[in-house]
Image: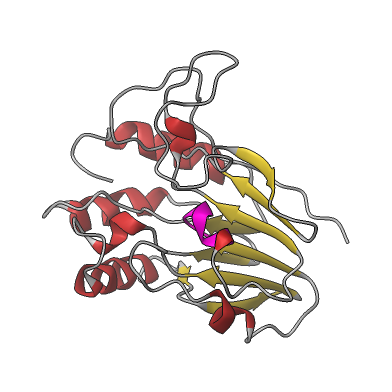
Amino acid sequence: MCSYVDEGYLTHSLDRARALAPDIVVFTGDFVTWERTSIMQVDRVLSHFPHGKLGTLAILGNHDYGPTWRDPRIADRIVATVSARGIHVLRNETASVAGLDVIGVDDLWSGRADPQRALEQRSSPAAIALCHNPDAQDSPGWDGYSGWILAGHTHGGQCKAPFLPPPILPVSNKRYSAGEVRVDATRTLYINRGVGHLLKARFNVRPEITLFTLTG
């Protein structure tokens, strides 16, 4: 969140998600685009944040580490504010929610992503992973993980011509744009387009809050 993302739009989006009454809520990073007023704004908006009946978890994105994307002091302030709202922030950790392991990998551009450390804490064969930047899928440390990974970061490119890829994507692997992407034989990404923006423009890339139904 920042001064150029309308608070009314954000809170309306979160209220709609809350109306779905989800069992588990996960957030894949970028609570803010850092400004001095970001902490106050994020606290106000998070009063509308949906909470899962079983658990509410999140990871950090690059913008949560400040304008340089590498300031741990800013990240710690974000975590403290978010945690006070009942959201469990995973930083290379795994949390168990009703028998499901939720694996949270820290942000790639911050230099703190460590999927191996997060995966070592698993206790259940049933798992889902959270990883803000899809490019982290091409880095070491995922050995032994089979399943889905939920990501964000790209905004789907925000603008794209019909039938063409978006011209600007903040990832090295241009396959990682939006939606479902098969990483390899064992891993599948789902890249959420998000509800925020950097530029106040979207074309052919609608904002998104995704509802999944998990089956055993």
Residue 173, position as x, y percentages in the image: 52, 46
How many marks the image carries: the answer is 0
Seen at 60% across and 78% down, the residue is 95
| Residue farthest to the left, as pictured | 36
Residue 166, position as x, y percentages in the image: 47, 26
Query: Is 212 situated above or below 85?
Result: above
The quadrant where residue 158 appears: top left
Which of the pair 142/55 is nearer the observer? 142
Q: Quadrant of the C terminus?
A: bottom right
Q: Is residue 205 magenta?
A: no
Report whether 27 appears left or right of 119: left
Q: How is the image coloured?
A: secondary structure
Which of the pair 23/203 is nearer the observer? 203
Residue 192 in view of the camera: yes
Seen at 76% across and 66% down, the residue is 146
| Residue farthest to the top, as pictured | 162
Residue 98 in view of the camera: no
Query: Is 3 situated above or below 163?
Result: below
| Magenta residue span | 131-137
Report whether 182 appears left or right of 191: right
Report whether 191 appears left or right of 181: left
Which of the pair 212/171 is nearer the observer? 171
Seen at 48% across and 57% down, the residue is 132
Query: Is 176 situated above or below 168?
Result: below
Residue 82, position as x, y percentages in the image: 36, 65
Residue 49, position as x, y percentages in the image: 44, 52
Which of the pair 140/211 is nearer the observer? 140
The quadrant where residue 168 appears: top left
Q: Is residue 135 magenta?
A: yes
Report whether 10 appears left or right of 77: right
Seen at 61% across and 41% down, the residue is 210
